[in-house]
Image: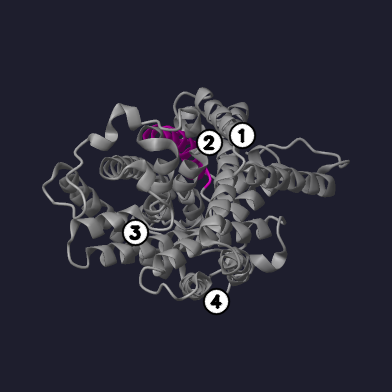
């Protein structure tokens, strides 16, 4: 698919891949969205939601891991869907994820503008959105190595901040660190009577918030195409990222629920910053606000990276205009980057609409998009293993493989489909669901009738040019040879 003159550089080291995936998840979903989820579903509902979401995340990540180790390409799950399901499925899934990822970048810009209101309440949010868009455009226009290094340090700052928050939050909850306007809550706010104030059904409705929060972990698959050693780095990153994501989210949910009643946790101000205000540590709240600002911009940066690489890959497969498949002298898909940034300007709608309204709408669309993408990853893995065995491949020759096949990918598909069915009952998310499903169907039918319908199909063997059980020839093998 890629010739020597039009290849991305394999400049991502193991530490870059790990921090890119971890940092892609620690952002708006944790620092802003966690409080909103607790407010809607209650402490118990939020905990169950994030645990359940962690289970789905595990299933998606191991499915993606098997595919990415076998075939590490920048197109990732879009390429896998095209190869192992159908080209029409790959086309629709690729564009679906692009829209969701680029929209998420818009959400991060909006969140960054909201955070800036703490220091500059008289400056419109859209102005900050425009400034941050320009900043992230510059970072993504650098070399892959520079991007990876910047994300490594950004993610490191976020991880340290979350750890410090957990330590301070525990101390505040038990009374070691006094709170300014209330006594130490201990476990009062976690009393059984207040765990599920809106009932259990609301958990499934708010799962789109949870899925949105976990979005970004699949960057492991996209970054595999620029990883120095995919077969070693991807399994290691999956193990480490999964554990840390779940621990960070669950710890933060418990602490926030213990200190604040669910009714106090709103959307426009981060509860992390509010807690720092209450403990009275000089400038702690401003420092935390800055850290969160860095975090949400980092996630936006990762989303732009993912969208740009995916668009570049689709262009090379004839599923996007050829202009997006060109690389500049720094081996950056610059045209794809420009288009991604323009699409992300959805965040500037905050200039004419309320920021919180736009935030929730964009978050819903992004969550629905990534849910459908996760279903595509699970289905791709199911079809890959089935066709791999049929072609004569041996399981023991797979460097990384999932357990409990085919139960695990099938369960992942069913659960994700069930979540989409539940949110159809939520009037605030039904519009996003309709848009997402309609976009997927229209994309699939467009490609099918244009490229597949009525044409004679030759028997297709996805392993035709490979030895069964051997890793696909990639740019890495070319470099080694």
Taking the image as drawn, is residue 287 in sight? yes
Between 347 and 97, which is closer to the camera in this rendering?
A: 347
| 2 or 3: mark nearer the eye | 2
Which residue is labeled 2 in the image? 205
Q: Which mark is residue 329?
A: 4
Q: Give the extent of the magenta segment.
A: 47-71
| 3 or 1: mark nearer the eye | 1
What residue lies at 54% left-to-right and 70% top-to-bottom?
332
Vertical position of residue 311 compared to residue 449: above or below: below
Furthest-right residue in view?
Answer: 454
Disc 1 to disc 2: CB gap under 8 Å: yes
Vertical position of residue 466 compared to residue 319: above or below: above
Disc 2 to disc 4: CB gap under 8 Å: no
Between 94 and 68, which is closer to the camera in this rendering?
A: 94
What's the CA distance linking mark 3 and mark 1?
36 Å
The mark nearer the N terminus, 3 or 1, is 3
Which residue is labeled 1 in the image? 425
Residue 228, picture quadrant: bottom left
Other-residue count near label 2 (Cα within 10 Å), few / some / many at <14 / 14–19 / ≥20: many
Residue 282, horizontal then vertical, whole percent: 18, 66
What's the CA distance linking mark 2 and mark 3?
30 Å
What's the CA distance linking mark 1 and mark 2?
8 Å
Left or right: where 369 falls relative to 198? right
Which residue is labeled 3 in the image? 155
The mark nearer the N terminus, 2 or 4, is 2
Other-residue count near label 3 (Cα within 10 Å), few / some / many at <14 / 14–19 / ≥20: many
Label 4 element class = loop
């Amino acid at each position: 698919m890629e010739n020597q003159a039009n290849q991305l550089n394999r400049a991502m080291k193991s530490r870059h891949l790990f921090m890119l995936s971890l940092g892609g998840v620690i952002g708006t979903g944790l620092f802003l969205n966690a409080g909103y989820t607790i407010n809607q579903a209650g402490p118990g509902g939020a905990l169950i939601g994030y645990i359940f979401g962690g289970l789905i995340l595990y299933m998606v990540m191991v499915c993606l891991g098997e595919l990415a180790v076998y075939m590490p390409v920048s197109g990732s799950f879009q390429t896998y869907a095209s190869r192992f399901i159908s080209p029409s499925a790959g086309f629709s899934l690729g564009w679906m994820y692009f829209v969701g990822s680029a929209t998420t970048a818009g959400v991060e810009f909006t969140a960054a503008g909201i955070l800036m209101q703490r220091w500059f309440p008289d400056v419109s949010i859209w102005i900050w959105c425009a400034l941050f868009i320009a900043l992230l455009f510059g970072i993504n226009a650098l070399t892959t190595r520079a991007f990876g290094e910047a994300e490594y340090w950004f993610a490191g700052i976020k991880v340290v901040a979350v750890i410090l928050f957990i330590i301070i939050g525990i101390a505040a909850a038990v009374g070691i660190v006094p709170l300014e306007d209330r006594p130490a809550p201990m476990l009062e706010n976690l009393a059984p009577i207040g765990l599920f104030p809106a009932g259990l059904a609301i958990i499934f409705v708010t799962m789109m918030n949870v899925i949105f929060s976990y979005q970004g972990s699949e960057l492991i698959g996209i970054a595999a195409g620029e990883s120095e050693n995919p077969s070693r780095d991807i399994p290691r990153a999956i193990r480490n990222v999964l554990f840390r994501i779940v621990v960070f989210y669950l710890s933060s949910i418990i602490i926030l629920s213990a200190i604040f009643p669910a009714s106090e946790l709103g959307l426009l101000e981060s509860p992390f910053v509010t807690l720092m205000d209450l403990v009275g540590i000089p400038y702690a709240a401003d420092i935390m606000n800055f850290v969160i600002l860095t975090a949400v911009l980092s996630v936006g940066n990762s989303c732009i990276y993912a969208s740009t690489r995916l668009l570049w890959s689709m262009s090379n497969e004839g599923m996007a205009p050829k202009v997006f498949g060109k690389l500049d002298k720094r081996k950056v898909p610059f045209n794809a980057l420009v288009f991604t940034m323009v699409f992300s300007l959805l965040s500037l709608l905050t200039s004419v609409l309320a920021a919180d309204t736009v935030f929730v709408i964009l978050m819903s669309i992004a969550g629905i998009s990534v849910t459908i993408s996760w279903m595509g990853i699970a289905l791709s893995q199911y079809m890959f293993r089935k066709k791999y065995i049929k072609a004569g491949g041996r399981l023991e020759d797979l460097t990384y493989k999932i357990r409990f096949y085919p139960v695990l990918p099938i369960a992942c598909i069913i659960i994700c489909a069930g979540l989409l069915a539940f949110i159809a009952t939520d009037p605030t998310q039904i519009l996003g669901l309709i848009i997402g499903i309609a976009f997927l169907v229209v994309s699939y039918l467009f490609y099918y009738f244009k490229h597949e319908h009525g044409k004679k199909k030759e028997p297709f063997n996805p392993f035709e040019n490979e030895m069964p059980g051997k890793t696909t020839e990639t740019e890495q093998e070319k470099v080694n040879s």
